[in-house]
Every structure is written in C-alpha cells, then in structure tokens.
Image (tube, grey):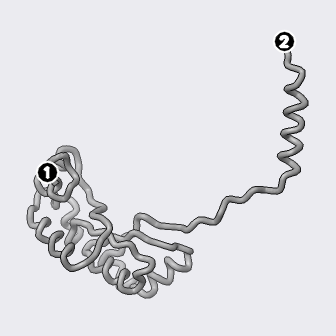
Amino acid sequence: MRNPFVAPVLLLAGTLALAMPGIQAAELPVIDSHIHYSHDAWSLVPPKDAIAILRKAGLKRAMVSSSNDDGTQMLLAEAPDLIVPVLRPYRNRNDVGSWVRDESVIAHLEQRLKKHRYVGIGEFHAFGADIELPTSTRCGTGSGPG
C-alpha cells in the first residue's frame, strides 16, 4: 500500500531546497602537513622565496622536515609563525635506507633535540621488522621501550 503523504512531502522538500540560498562552508585555514626543504632545494629556492611561495598559496601553517635538518631551521628562522618543525632521523639522504641499523642516529637526534624545538620526529622510512630494531624503538616507533 502506498503512503499518500510521501509525494507531497518530497515535493515540499524539493521546493524548499531550491528556494534556499546556497549554504557555504566556513573558510578554514590551509595547513600543509608534509613539506621537505632539503639541501638540494636551498640554492634553487632560497628560504625567503620558499616562504613567499607558501604564503602566496594561502598556507597558515606548514609542517616541514628536511634532510639534513638545516633546511627546516632556515625556514623556521624566516617564518616562525608559519613553519612547524619536524625532525627527520636523516643526516643526509644516504640515511634513508640505513638509519634503522645505525645507532649513531640516536646521538644525532638527541643533539638536534637539545638545540632546537620540534613538534615531532618524522617522516622516516622503516620496512617490516625494521621497525622493531633498537634505533627504531629508541625513536618511539616500535613496540619496544621508547
């Protein structure tokens, strides 16, 4: 049995939807949570220019990590209101595949953490059981003591 009220209710709902002005979402800040400013970019896009590009794009905050960390620090010095610093465990790009097996990375991280302010450690690459190696767990990435 058909409900005699369905058609009039649908007609009324459709009419109201068409009659209402468009509803716009509030404008929200744009935040980029994954930017690298590594050594190979510094001469191509100096820090002042990099910050100008981010501001022109409308970014309100940008999480930045670099290999090596000096790139992050240069951007942070240029725009502390914009840059959110994140520390990578890489001293250079060669560390990408070896950092989990290199316990000297811990001393590097500790030295940087004493010298600068960061909101986190990352981005880093670890595959399979590598995440359980001592260097990984010391960084707080594995299930071991961190």
* Image spot of residue 22 (x, y percent): 79, 56
Residue 44, by quadrant, is: bottom left
Question: Under tag 2, what secondary structure?
Answer: loop
Up-down relation of residue 14 to residue 21 (above or below): above
- Residue occupied by mark 2: 1
- Front residue (pair 132, 37): 132
- Indicate the amino acid at tag 1: Pro
- Residue under the image location 14 percent in, 51 percent down: 145
Residue 40 is situated, as x and y percent measured from the top left of the image, at 32, 78
SS for dot 1: loop
* x, y percent for residue 32: 46, 66
Rendered position, 42 above or below 120: below
| Rendered-image quadrant of the C terminus | bottom left
The structure residue drawn at horizontal position 85% and vertical position 40%, both measured from the top left corner, is 14
Q: Report, in whole angstroms, how far the alpha carbon at label 1 lies from the one at label 2.
A: 66 Å
The answer to whether residue 102 is left or right of residue 40 is left
Which tag, 1 or 2, sits closer to the chain's start?
2
| Residue located 15% across and 70% down the image | 110
Quadrant position of residue 107: bottom left
Circle number at residue 145 = 1
Q: x, y (%) of residue 86?
A: 31, 69
| Residue in the foreground of this view, choosing between 118 and 45 | 118
Q: Which quadrant would residue 71 be assigned to in this image?
A: bottom left
- Left-right relation of 61 to 96: right
Q: Quick check: 19 left or right of 121?
A: right
Disc 2 residue crowd, few under 14, some 14–19, many 20+, Cα 10 Å:
few
Residue depicted at x 30% and y 64%? 120
The tally of labels here is 2
Amino acid at pointer 2: Met
